[in-house]
Amino acid sequence: MFAAAKTYVEWHNRFREPKIRLEVASYLQSPVAALLELQRRGAAAVLGFTTSDTGLDAASVAERLEMPLIAVSASTSMLAGKDDWFFRVQPSTRADSSAYSRLFRFRGIGTLAVVATWENAPYVLAFVRDLYVKGSPRILGPFLLSEIQQADGALAALNPDGILVVGPTPFSIWASQRATKLWPRAELFLSLWSVTGLGFREYSLLGRPFFFSTAFSPLAISEEHPFIVAWREEYAADVTFTVHRTFLALELFRLAAEDVERGNAASFRESLAMSRHIDGPGGDVIMDRYGDAHAQPRFFRWDGERLQEVPVP
């Protein structure tokens, strides 16, 4: 996230006004010290907190300090629909679960084994709970990776139609390999969290085809987009979902800052809470008055060699 934010600020300051000053503070295990330090330095808003557990903590601190907080992801539905000081450009787990439910129905998945980590519990619990609420498919689990590794015949006999892995990328790679060995006939689905930090060239690490849903299309990214040109000048890395969402978050900051008097935190919050449309290099979002993002879901399949968009009715 920091690399994308630094690239955005340098690109923006080269071509656009007003200039943006980027301050950096580490929040370690608690956001309190970081937000206080950034407030002391005169920051108009805070960008960060890519996980739902840190986002929940930071949202309560931002509320007390009356300091706008723009999260790059932190997508738990526990933070949705609130008149607070928390804003995000990633749709909530409620939207994710609706999209995945459509994908499961399209693929004819009747039973789904969920393999999850308890790391970042506010995201995992909200996503799986929201899937349960949809009622389709029938969910088995969630299973921990340790349960899959020590599986007995009874677990193998469950024989699900699909496997959904929910966790960070390193966990998801290992869990996918173990779960598909246990249930070889099941189709593999990855949560957006699982693929957030992966570029195209790294999808093969999963070892087999898989599906996922996202609001942003890695296939739609234009190499001619001015921010992407700046990113390519600085890095040889792929444009990941984190890079794209960081761009959207800073565009939200820029658009809100154009409407307010410098130093007026309350006015800045009101501007962030305006309904607005934000274009990004891989897709756009609609922001509502609660600071929640909305976008049309897209569906993708990695076939082992290339990524394809899947039309899902």
Image (spheres, rainbow, N blue to C red):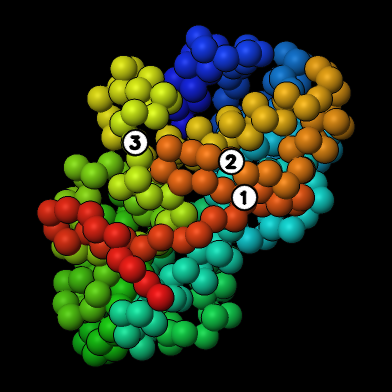
Give how far apart the Cα atoms at labels 3 and 1 are.
20 Å
Q: Is residue 32 left or right of residue 3?
A: right
User: Residue type at mark 2?
Assistant: Ile
Q: Mark 3, residues whose alpha carbon is within 10 Å: few (<14), some, or many (≥20)?
A: few
The relative height of residue 258 versus residue 140 in the rendered view (above or below) is: above
Q: Mark 1, residues whose alpha carbon is within 10 Å: few (<14), some, or many (≥20)?
A: some
Q: Which residue is mark 1?
A: 286
Secondary structure state at the residue bearing disc 2: strand
Tell me the tag on residue 222. 3
Q: Which residue is mark 2?
A: 278
User: Residue type at mark 1?
Assistant: Ile
User: Residue type at mark 3?
Assistant: Ser
The relative height of residue 178 versus residue 57 in the rendered view (above or below) is: below
Q: Residue at x 35, y 80 (%)?
A: 106
Give how far apart the Cα atoms at labels 2 and 1 are.
6 Å
Q: Is residue 13 left or right of residue 244?
A: right
